[in-house]
Image: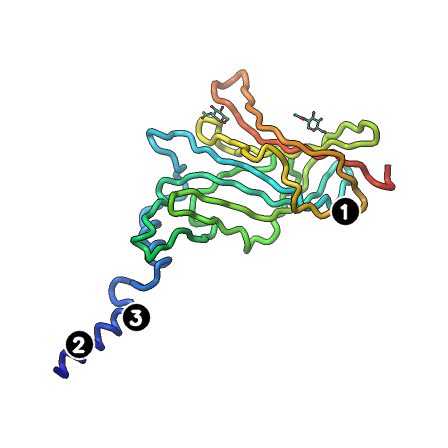
Amino acid sequence: MCRKFLLQVVLIGFYITGGCNGYPDMPEELLLKALFQKYNKNARPATVLMPVVTVDHGMDLIRINSFKDNTLRTDVWERMTWHDPRLVWNPSNYFGLTSLSITPDMVWTPDVTLYNGVGEIQKADLFRRITVNSNGMLLWLFPAQLESACVYKKKNGKYDCRLKFASWTYNGLQLNLTHTDRQLGMSNFYPNPDYEIMGTNSTLNLMRYACCPEPYPDVSYQVSFKGVGKG
Ligand SMILES: *[C@@H]1O[C@H](CO)[C@@H](O)[C@H](O)[C@H]1NC(C)=O
Ligand SMILES: *[C@@H]1O[C@H](CO)[C@@H](O)[C@H](O)[C@H]1NC(C)=O
């Protein structure tokens, strides 16, 4: 009787401290161990049947900071979503856990870059975590401070600047871009009294070059504005 009781105490202690299974009562710990045991973050999340990784790109304009010497400084929220078939799990095997928040250095991330950037300052790195859903969809939403070269056409006192995003190393057969928002998000915009926004839009473009058969997609956002009191 006493021995049996002792054994139970030992077993409970074993369970609470984790025993040899690591942390059996910690869903995130268990799941991370299962997902990342063999994960290679340099491998694109492509399969033989789905060889093209599709990345959706969206952006909110938060503020125009300045426009000086053909350089436009903006605060934005950048947003990318894609699917990684290695990061799929059944929530019922993990105490109902349906999503995880992880740091970007753990997974393959799209190298979508501001092409006309002149020094991309990434602000608030701590918040650049990625949300992974049990269906394998990843959402990467982060604030950034962008500096872009603006080759503008000044028309009626109005500047048109373009922010072009594309993958740095992959072509469109490896990483395709989509743009489901079809606009530059303005719902979180914070006006700067020095600049008046005249209009915004965005386009998904597919470039082909004479050299190569593969397409090169990009998502470009346009901002038209006037400098108030500065011409
Ligand atoms: C890339 O996406 C575009 C737009 O959705 C689509 O028309 C095109 O077929 C896609 N390309 C590939 C290689 O999947
Ligand atoms: C997007 O806006 C820019 C600047 O206002 C303009 O030049 C361009 O024609 C617009 N493009 C589309 C597709 O509306």
Q: Distance between the residues labelled 3 and 2?
A: 15 Å
Q: Distance between the residues labelled 3 and 1?
A: 54 Å
Q: Which residue is drawn at 66% across and 39% down?
A: 118
Residue closest to the eye, 202 or 121: 202
Q: Is residue 176 above or below residue 95?
A: above
- Residue 131: image location, x then y, percent: 46, 49
Judged from the image, the quadrant occupied by ligand 2 is top right
Q: Earlier in the sequence, mark 3 or mark 1?
A: 3
Contact check, label 2 and label 1, Cβ < 8 Å: no
Disc number for residue 192? 1
- Residue 2: image location, x then y, percent: 14, 83
The quadrant of the rendering that contains the N terminus is bottom left
> Where is mark 3, residue-wise?
17
Q: Distance between the residues labelled 2 and 1?
A: 69 Å
Disc number for residue 7? 2
Left or right, 193 with respect to 178, comes to right
How many C-alpha atoms fall within 10 Å of the one at disc 1: few (<14), some, or many (≥20)? some
Q: Which residue lies furthest to the top in this view?
A: 210
